Image: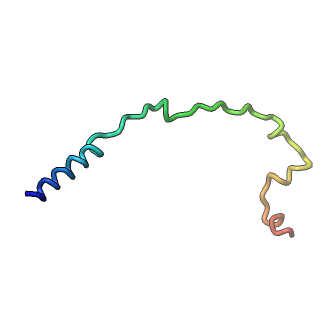
């Protein structure tokens, strides 16, 4: 009889703790809006002095 009472109290404690799902979180609360940075035209401008840095070449990588 005592073991059934202990089981019942364990079941009651478990139901009190895990008996219901947590509150739903709205989508708006999970998402953060962030403005994009404007396009920088000088970033993609043609620069003959540094044009070699944008290409990958095995001979250059091996310093041949």
* Horizontal side, residue 30 vs residue 45: left or right: left
Residue 52: x, y in percent? 85, 54
* Direction left: furthest residue: 1
| Quarter of the image with the N terminus in it | bottom left
* Horizontal side, residue 27 vs residue 46: left or right: left
Number of numbered tags placed on the structure image: 0
Residue 16: x, y in percent? 26, 43
Residue 46: x, y in percent? 86, 42
Q: Please name the residue shown 86% across and 50% down the image.
A: 51
- Residue 32: quadrant of the picture: top right
- Residue 40: quadrant of the picture: top right
Q: Please name the residue shown 24% across and 45% down the image.
A: 15
Q: How is the image coloured?
A: rainbow
Residue 6 position (above or below residue 31) = below
* Direction front: furthest residue: 2
Q: Please name the residue shown 21% across and 46% down the image.
A: 12
- Viewer-proximal residue, 16 or 58? 16
- Viewer-proximal residue, 23 or 17? 17
- Residue 24: quadrant of the picture: top left
- Viewer-proximal residue, 16 or 5? 5
Residue 9 position (above or below residue 20) = below
Residue 5: x, y in percent? 13, 53
Q: Please name the residue shown 83% across and 53% down the image.
A: 53
Residue 61 position (above or below residue 29) = below
* Direction right: furthest residue: 49
| Quarter of the image with the C terminus in it | bottom right
- Viewer-proximal residue, 33 or 50? 33
């Amino acid at each position: 009889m005592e073991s059934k009472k202990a089981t019942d109290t364990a079941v009651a404690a478990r139901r009190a703790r895990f008996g219901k799902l947590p509150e739903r979180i709205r989508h708006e609360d999970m998402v953060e809006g962030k403005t994009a940075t404007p396009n920088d035209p000088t970033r993609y401008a043609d620069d003959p002095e540094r044009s070699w840095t944008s290409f990958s070449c095995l001979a250059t990588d091996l310093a041949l």
